[in-house]
Amino acid sequence: MTHHLALYQVNPEMKQCIQNCLDCHSICLNTVTYCLQQGGMHSELPHIRLMLDCAEICQTSANFMLRGSETCIRTCAICAEICLKCAEDCDRMGDDEQMKACAQMCRTCAETCRQMSMSMAG
């Protein structure tokens, strides 16, 4: 049985952005564990730190949108920036399905966060 999230005063675009942020948060945290198990360049501190930063800003951005925070325009903008950096760093890991999936989710989240920050600015 599927339940659809009913959010008070949240338009469909913001709902999608929130979902992308939550999905990106989840895959980044899950991929950190994968990277630590892989070792080598996957487990290098700058890479792990960036993935944790990405997970954290995605969670924060989703929370700000859910609360209707006046500063969510800024959290969405920085979220987009960090997600793109994380995607590029994940791509650096080569032909690895887990890293490709993480990079793709980061790009999807970055795009919706960028669009959200631009639409709220306008």
Image (cartoon, rainbow, N blue to C red):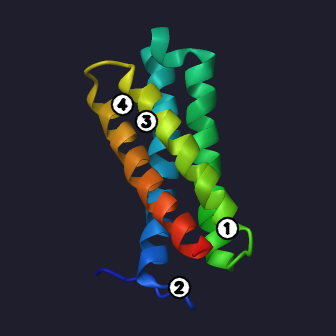
Marks 4, 3: nearer the viewer: 3
> Label 4: how many residues lie within 10 Å, few (<14), some (14-19) or many (20+)?
many
Q: Earlier in the sequence, mark 2 or mark 3?
A: 2
Q: Element under label 4? A: helix
Q: Quadrant of the C terminus?
A: bottom right
Q: Position of residue 118 (x, y in %)?
A: 54, 66
- Cα distance, mark 2 to mark 3? 27 Å
> Label 2: how many residues lie within 10 Å, few (<14), some (14-19) or many (20+)?
some
Marks 2, 1: nearer the viewer: 1
Q: Earlier in the sequence, mark 2 or mark 4?
A: 2
Q: Position of residue 69 (x, y in %)?
A: 72, 75
Q: Could you tell me if the residues under marks 3 and 1 are in contact, i.e. CB atoms within 8 Å? A: no
Q: Position of residue 21 (x, y in %)?
A: 50, 58
Marks 2, 4: nearer the viewer: 2
Q: Earlier in the sequence, mark 1 or mark 4?
A: 1
- Cα distance, mark 3 to mark 1? 22 Å
Which residue position is annotated with label 2?
10
**Residue 72, which numbered label?**
1
Q: Could you tell me if the residues under marks 1 and 4 are in contact, i.e. CB atoms within 8 Å? A: no
- Cα distance, mark 2 to mark 4? 31 Å
Residue depicted at x 51% and y 60%: 113
Which residue position is annotated with label 3?
87
Q: In this view of the protein, which residue sits in the foreground, 40 or 112?
A: 112
Which residue position is annotated with label 4?
99
Residue depicted at x 36% and y 26%: 91
Residue depicted at x 48% and y 40%: 84
Question: Hey, what amino acid is under mark 3?
Answer: Ala
- In this picture, is 20 found above or below 105? below
Marks 1, 4: nearer the viewer: 1
